[in-house]
Each structure stands twice: as C-alpha cells, then as structure tokens.
Amino acid sequence: MIDDQAVRRLLQSALPPTTDLEPARDLWPAIARWRPARSEWPWLDLGVAAAVVLVLSLMPSWLWLLAYHL
Amino acid sequence: MDDPDEQLLERFVHGDQDAFESLFRQFEVEVYRWIVRIVRDSAAAEDVLVESFWRAYCGRARFDPSRSFGAWMRRIATNAALDQLRAARRRAQWSGAEPAAPAQASPDPGLRAAVAFAFRRLPPKMQAVAVLALVEERPLAEIAAALDLPVGTVKSRLSRANARLRMELGHLGIRP
C-alpha cells in the first residue's frame, strides 16, 4: 500500500515545483483588449429622452398617448 | 507582497483604468506564478492571467478596499485556473485525445508519466489541492483562502485526493 509520503514523493518527481516563472510577454495589451470599452455617455439615449421631456413640457396631453404606447 | 495603498484600491473600485493597470503591473507576476502552480502550463497560465484580471475588473464593485487585494486576486485566479482545468478535461474527453495510460510504470520516465497520468485523472478541485499542498508545499491556510474554503475542508479534500491517487497508482501497478 502506498502511504501519503510516497504519494507526495511520486507527485514531486512527476510534477516538479514551479519557480520564478514570469509571463513571456507583456499581457497588459491583451487585458486592455478584453476589458469592456470605456463607459461612454449614451448620447443617442440622452437625446431621445431630452426630446421626449421637451415635447411633453410643450404638449402635456401627449403624456396619455405616450403612456398608452408604453 | 505589500498590498497597495487604499487610495489606489478605491480608484480601482471606481473604475479608474490607470489604477487598474498599476495593480496589474504590481501583481501580475505573483498571480501568474500562482496560476502556473495549478494549471502546470505556462502558455495556458497566460490566458488564465488575462481572464483573471478581466474578471477582477468586472467584479471590482464587490471588492472591499480595506481587504487584501492580493488575496482577493488569488481567489479569482484560482477559480479561473479551475475553469481552465475543467475546460481542458472536457476538450480531452470530447476529442478522445485523453492520454493513454502508460503501459509500464517501472523505469523512471515511465513512472513519472504514470504518476502525471494518475494526477490528471483527479477532478480539477482535487488536482488544485493536491498540487498546491503536496508539490508546491503551500500552507493549508493559504490554499483554503485561495479556494475560499475552511481549512478543514481543504484537509478532507487533500485526504480524498491522496486516497484517489493511491487508487489510480495502484491500478497502474505502481507500488513503491
């Protein structure tokens, strides 16, 4: 029967400990590519929202029309 | 490694990308070495490193800047490394490219191949515990923190990994 120490020795001979390894290249560019793009203001959404607010302030009765379609 | 100052960590949590790059530069080697210990493949470890830092950036809002960034990063890297081991295992099963069991275990290179084969047959979580504890000789508390498990669970997992390895090695006819 193999004891725990024997298993340890066998594993250490088959899988030598890793020491002092470093990435072979600069990985920051890969991370920058993976990373989600900078959150930018959704200008189109803001424009539509502003237009809706403007229209509703000029013609409040359209609120019901808008509510009906939502 | 010393943890970075809390101001830098606060900036990272708020999405400051210069802070993120600064943390990456400070921790990349330490995290890479941790990942290599688990996946045992330097090229795969580079992919896991990228994946880990990306996960960290996505999950930055959950990080508490008063805690250790290194320990948090190691937990993320451990999970990413385990995912890599699982994916490699699935790929090997689907492609039918799982290495054949070495025919004979007695000559030294054959013995090493047989032991490596038996090791690769362990479930990924057992592989991680076995390699970190038995090969890399990392303290159980460190392994427990990286796996986000109590030390007792790590001990029992290590014990199961030992038993499973003994069984696999026995099947291969290895009885030192």
Image (cartoon, rainbow, N blue to C red):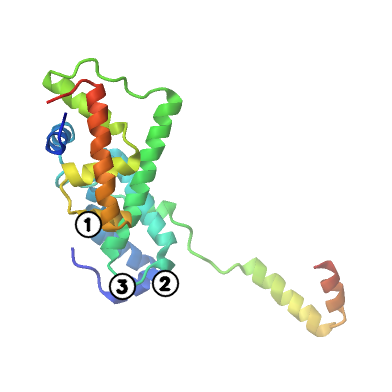
Disc 3 residue crowd, few under 14, some 14–19, many 20+, Cα 10 Å: some
Pick the residue in front: B49 or B149. B149
Q: Is residue B141 above or below residue B158?
A: below
Give, as a three-letter code, the residue at label 3. Answer: Leu
Farthest residue, direction top: B103
Q: Residue at x 12, y 38 (%)?
A: A5
Q: Position of residue A8 (x, y in %)?
A: 15, 38
Kindly report the distance in space between the C-alpha atoms of the residues bearing marks 1 and 2.
28 Å
Q: Position of residue A60 (x, y in %)?
A: 84, 83
Kindly report the distance in space between the C-alpha atoms of the residues bearing marks 3 and 1.
25 Å
Which quarter of the rendered picture does the N terminus of chain B lie within? Answer: bottom left
Q: Residue at x 30, y 45 (%)?
A: B46
Residue B15's disc is: none
The residue that label 2 is drawn on is B14
Q: Position of residue B115 (x, y in %)?
A: 21, 28
The residue that label 1 is drawn on is B142
Disc 1 residue crowd, few under 14, some 14–19, many 20+, Cα 10 Å: some
Disc 2 residue crowd, few under 14, some 14–19, many 20+, Cα 10 Å: few
The residue that label 3 is drawn on is B8
**Residue B69 placement: quadrant:** bottom left
Kindly report the distance in space between the C-alpha atoms of the residues bearing marks 3 and 2.
10 Å
For residue A28, say whether it is visible. Answer: no
Q: Residue at x 87, y 73 (%)?
A: A65
Indicate which label's residue lies in the foreground, 1 or 2.
1
Q: Is residue A30 above or below residue B7?
A: above
Question: Given contact means CB atoms under 8 Å apart, are the residues at marks 3 and 1 in contact?
Answer: no
Residues behind callouts 1 and 2 on a single chain? yes
**Residue B100 placement: quadrant:** top left
